[in-house]
Amino acid sequence: MLIDPAALRWQVINDEVMGGCSNSSFTAEDGCLHFRGELSTANGGGFASIRAELCDPPAAFSGLRLCVSGDGRHYQVRLRETAHSEAIAWRALFEARAAAESVEFMPDDFEAVIRGRRVETLPGLRHRSVRHLGFMLTSKRPGPFALTVHQIETVERDA
């Protein structure tokens, strides 16, 4: 199932919540999601993110396919069952190269984290009800960044 980024209500969540001074913004135009900003490591910062609640979440997560391009940095796609900041997020990493390319993530590609720290939890992401989708950049390298998400699609696989 294709997910229209323009139909989602994106929210910016940067390191400002912890005293950092990174800034970011997004636009959803021409069928793409554009996530841009300036990453700063000042005041212990170093992350920028956006997140949205899925309008029509799948009953159980079985996979995700993205078509992305960008600045060569490594980004995270993050999935959550709830928006609560202390809840588990499931992250998988990808590189956003200059040319658009498709990246597919299956449940075993994700690791569970709480506030960036890995946690061991059972069972894994497979068959969970994912209600939130996000993208995050974390880095010790400050400077401008740009990620374009050309397509978001859930992947249906048999159990």
Image (cartoon, rainbow, N blue to C red):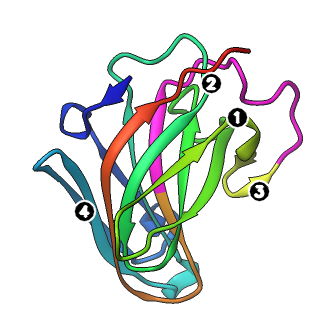
Asked if the residue under mark 3 is in contact with the one under mark 4, i.e. CB atoms within 8 Å, the reply is no
Residue position for label 1: 107
Q: Is residue 114 above or below residue 156?
A: below
The amino acid sitting under disc 2 is Ser
Residue position for label 2: 62
The residue segment tinted magenta is: 119-135
Q: Considering the numbered disc 4 on the image, is that residue within a helix, a strand or a loop?
A: strand
Precedes in sequence: disc 2 or disc 3:
2
Residue 120 painted magenta: yes
Q: Is residue 45 left or right of residue 98?
A: right
Q: Considering the numbered disc 1 on the image, is that residue within a helix, a strand or a loop?
A: helix
Precedes in sequence: disc 1 or disc 2:
2
The amino acid sitting under disc 1 is Pro
Residue position for label 4: 25
Q: Is residue 54 above or below residue 146?
A: above
Q: Position of residue 36 (x, y in %)?
A: 28, 69
Residue position for label 3: 117
Asked if the residue under mark 2 is in contact with the one under mark 1, i.e. CB atoms within 8 Å, the reply is yes
Residue at 58% across, 26% down: 81
Q: Quadrant of the N terminus?
A: top left
Residue at 66% across, 20% down: 128
Q: Considering the numbered disc 3 on the image, is that residue within a helix, a strand or a loop?
A: strand
Asked if the residue under mark 1 is in contact with the one under mark 3, i.e. CB atoms within 8 Å, the reply is no
Q: Position of residue 101 (x, y in %)?
A: 41, 60
Local crowd size for mark 4, using a 10 Å CA cut-off: few (<14), some (14–19), many (≥20): some
> Gap in Å between the C-alphas at discs 2 and 3?
24 Å
